[in-house]
Image: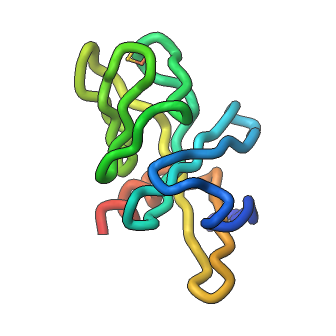
Amino acid sequence: MSDWHRIGLVTDIPRRGARCVNSPFGRIAVFRTAEDRIFATEDRCPHKGGPLSQGIVHDSSVTCPLHNAVISLKSGEMRGPDEGRVRVFATRVDPLTEVIELSLEDEAAAIREAAE
Ligand code: FES
């Protein structure tokens, strides 16, 4: 069972940008795509720890600002210059209020939901 936390509004995040929230797992980057989809991952690139929240969001991916690795916001998997993945977290948005909620509990569910 997931434990959902309200973290703000969709409009608090610029399109194709991110904002950060602190958690017991460290800093989490919450991304908003050009299509207003919301994703959340660790704010730490698996290559050398670059701040993904400062990367460029394109489609459902982010490019790390340090060495340009592309990371899927759906699965957390990295494509070049190395292999690895970041932890992803489930998010949901209330369609009426546009409040974003974040779950810190079920990473597998986050990947399933993002794939839909
Ligand atoms: S730290 Fe992200 S690509 Fe190197």
Quadrant of the displayed image that contains ligand 1: top left
Query: Camera-side residue: 31 or 41?
Result: 31
Q: Which residue extends farthest left? A: 80
> Does residue 16 lie above or below 87 as drawn?
below
The spot of residue 28 in percent (x, y) is: 63, 40
Question: At x 43% / y 53%, what residue is drawn?
Answer: 108
> Does residue 59 lie above or below 81 as drawn?
below
Q: Is residue 62 left or right of residue 98?
A: left
The tally of labels here is 0
Q: Quadrant of the N terminus?
A: bottom right
Q: Which residue extends farthest front? A: 14
The spot of residue 97 in percent (x, y) is: 68, 83
Residue 85 lies in quadrant:
top left
Q: Quadrant of the C terminus?
A: bottom left
Query: Camera-side residue: 90 or 15?
Result: 15
Query: Camera-side residue: 110 or 30?
Result: 30
The spot of residue 43 in percent (x, y) is: 57, 32
Residue 11 lies in quadrant:
bottom right
Q: Is residue 31 left or right of residue 113?
A: right
> Does residue 98 lie above or below 114 as drawn?
below
Question: At x 58% / y 73%, what residue is drawn?
Answer: 93
Residue 4 lies in quadrant:
bottom right
- The colour scheme used here is rainbow
Question: At x 33% / y 42%, what residue is drawn?
Answer: 72
Query: Camera-side residue: 8 or 22?
Result: 8
Q: Which residue extends farthest bottom? A: 96
Question: At x 24% / y 27%, what residue is drawn?
Answer: 79
The spot of residue 22 in percent (x, y) is: 75, 39
